[in-house]
Image (cartoon, rainbow, N blue to C red):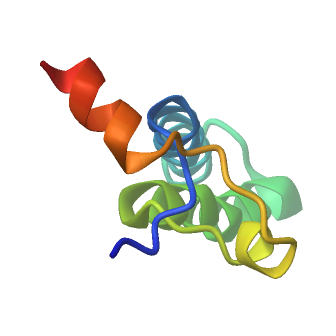
Amino acid sequence: MSYMNEGTVDRVVRIALGILLLVLGFGGIVEGTLGTVFKFLGFVPLLTGLAGWCPIYAIGRLSTRTSAKKEMVNAR
């Protein structure tokens, strides 16, 4: 039984967005208040993408993940 509620594309987008925000914030590309916000906000999509689970999706009982059976067939 899996608790993941994010599909592959959703996870890749979240990880890329998280990394981008962290680079912009910690890299000094965006400074000031917005840079500080990026430093903290970047961890949210990064961690949810790595975990494959989004608490907001869970509250709304949403999922972008295909069924496990479909994923097994597509992996072959």
User: Which residue is more in the foreground, 32 or 63?
Assistant: 63
Q: Is residue 18 above or below residue 32?
A: above
Q: Is residue 2 above or below residue 71?
A: below
Horizontal side, residue 42 vs residue 76: left or right: right
Horizontal side, residue 35 vs residue 75: left or right: right
User: Residue 71: x percent and y percent?
Assistant: 33, 34
Taking the spot 55% from the left edge, 37% from the top edge, the residue there is 20
Taking the spot 61% from the left edge, 51% from the top edge, the residue there is 25
User: Residue 9: x percent and y percent?
Assistant: 52, 29
Taking the spot 82% from the left edge, 81% from the top edge, the residue there is 59
- Dividing the picture into quadrants, the one containing residue 24 is top right
User: Residue 62: x percent and y percent?
Assistant: 77, 60
Considering every residue shown, the one lying at the far left of the view is 76
User: Which residue is more in the foreground, 44 or 12?
Assistant: 12
Horizontal side, residue 22 vs residue 40: left or right: left
Q: Is residue 52 above or below residue 67?
A: below
